[in-house]
Image (cartoon, grey):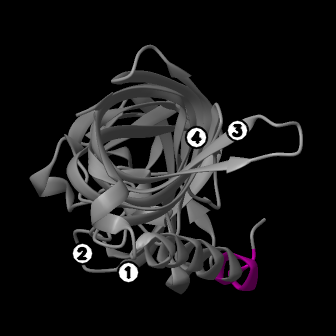
């Protein structure tokens, strides 16, 4: 696990690298600048990461595509063998679309809906054991990279940040079965599973859901490295691996809601219960992480 102090050191180092890159080349900026326009596509693991007190979480497939602009400063230096080593130092930005996802599975886990009242206004806690439940979550970000790029011969290295603006979020769950038991404090904490007409008992249906999730802006630490293949004087192809890690809570704008809704029996069909996203019910922090392979085509004007 990356601790807060280590993460701060990484951020400071990358910020220094980007600032130094710009400062180093400022004297020859207008004379030696090279403008590269690019388009990229990538894929691999793109996961929403969170911890839940119940159930199992797994990551999802991730995709990344977009366009970019890189401003380079070129240098060449002789090495001991008599050959020339070419380096480039640049600043990269652009626009991209990234997709992230995750899945939660519950089978036999118990969730508690607290501080409820029944039709006679008696307070109780509803304990629901959920069986064969799955929920998938998806998030789409419009990413704006602010990165430094360094090249030496055929190899390139990038580091910086991406600012991800959410342009889509949703969750979908399958139908599941729930067994309900009520805990009344005035009954000494005993659990009761009847009467069924107010939703107590076994074998109730939890309805399928397909609804939106509201995420906030994500700040991602972004790293990339690989090989640059020069096709001709104007066109190059980059092939490399990338790693993105969200530094903040992307789900802080989610509305808190109980996992399983309960209303007085006059207002719903007790044979079916509705629910909300498990992220709304349980998550404390959700961030994104992506690891994958990327191909970028660059054109120097």
Q: CA distance from mark 3 to mark 1?
A: 80 Å
Using residue 84 as the reference point, say whether residue 80 is left or right of it.
right
Near-viewer residue (62 or 39): 39
Give the magenta part as a residue range.
3-8
Q: Position of residue 27 (x, y in %)?
A: 40, 76
Cα separation, mark 4 vs mark 3, equals 29 Å
Residue highlighted by disc 1: 123
Q: Give the structural element (helix, strand or loop) at label 4.
A: strand
Classify mark 3: helix, strand or loop: strand
- Which mark is first along the chain, 1 or 3? 3
- Where residue 129 appears, x then y in whole percent? 57, 46
168 sits to left or right of 47: left
* Residue at which label 3 appears: 84
Looking at the image, which residue is at 45% across and 27% down?
A: 42
Name the front one of labels 2 and 4. 4
Q: Which residue is the site of mark 4?
A: 242
Whole-angstrom CA distance, mark 2 to mark 3, is 86 Å
Q: Which mark is residue 52?
A: none
Which quadrant would residue 156 be assigned to in this image? top right
Determine the CA span between mark 4 and mark 1: 52 Å
């Amino acid at each position: 696990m990356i601790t807060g102090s280590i993460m701060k050191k990484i951020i400071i180092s990358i910020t220094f690298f980007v600032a130094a890159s710009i400062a180093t080349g400022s004297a020859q900026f207008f004379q030696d600048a090279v403008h590269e326009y690019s388009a990229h596509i990538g894929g691999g693991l793109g996961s929403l990461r969170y911890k839940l007190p119940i159930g199992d979480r797994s990551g999802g497939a991730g995709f990344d595509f977009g366009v970019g602009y890189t401003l380079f400063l070129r240098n060449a230096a002789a090495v001991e063998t008599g050959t020339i080593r070419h380096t480039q130092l640049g600043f990269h930005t652009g626009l991209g679309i990234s997709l992230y996802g995750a899945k939660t599975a519950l089978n036999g886990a118990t969730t508690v809906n607290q501080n409820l009242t029944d039709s006679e206004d008696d307070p109780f806690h509803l304990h629901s054991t959920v069986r064969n439940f799955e929920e998938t979550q998806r998030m789409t970000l419009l990413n704006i990279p602010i990165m430094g790029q360094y090249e030496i011969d055929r190899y390139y290295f990038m580091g910086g940040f991406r600012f991800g603006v959410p342009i889509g979020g949703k969750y979908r769950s399958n139908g599941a079965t729930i067994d309900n038991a009520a805990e009344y404090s005035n009954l000494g904490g005993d659990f009761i599973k009847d009467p069924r007409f107010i939703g107590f008992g076994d074998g109730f249906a939890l309805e399928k859901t397909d609804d939106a999730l509201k995420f906030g802006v994500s700040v991602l630490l972004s790293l990339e490295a690989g090989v640059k293949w020069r096709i001709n004087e104007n066109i190059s192809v980059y092939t490399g691996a990338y790693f993105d890690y969200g530094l903040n809570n992307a789900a802080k704008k989610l509305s808190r809601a109980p996992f399983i809704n309960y209303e007085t029996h006059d207002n719903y069909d007790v044979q079916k219960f509705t629910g909300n996203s498990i992220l709304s019910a349980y998550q404390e922090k959700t961030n994104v992480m992506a690891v994958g392979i990327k191909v970028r085509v660059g054109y120097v004007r």
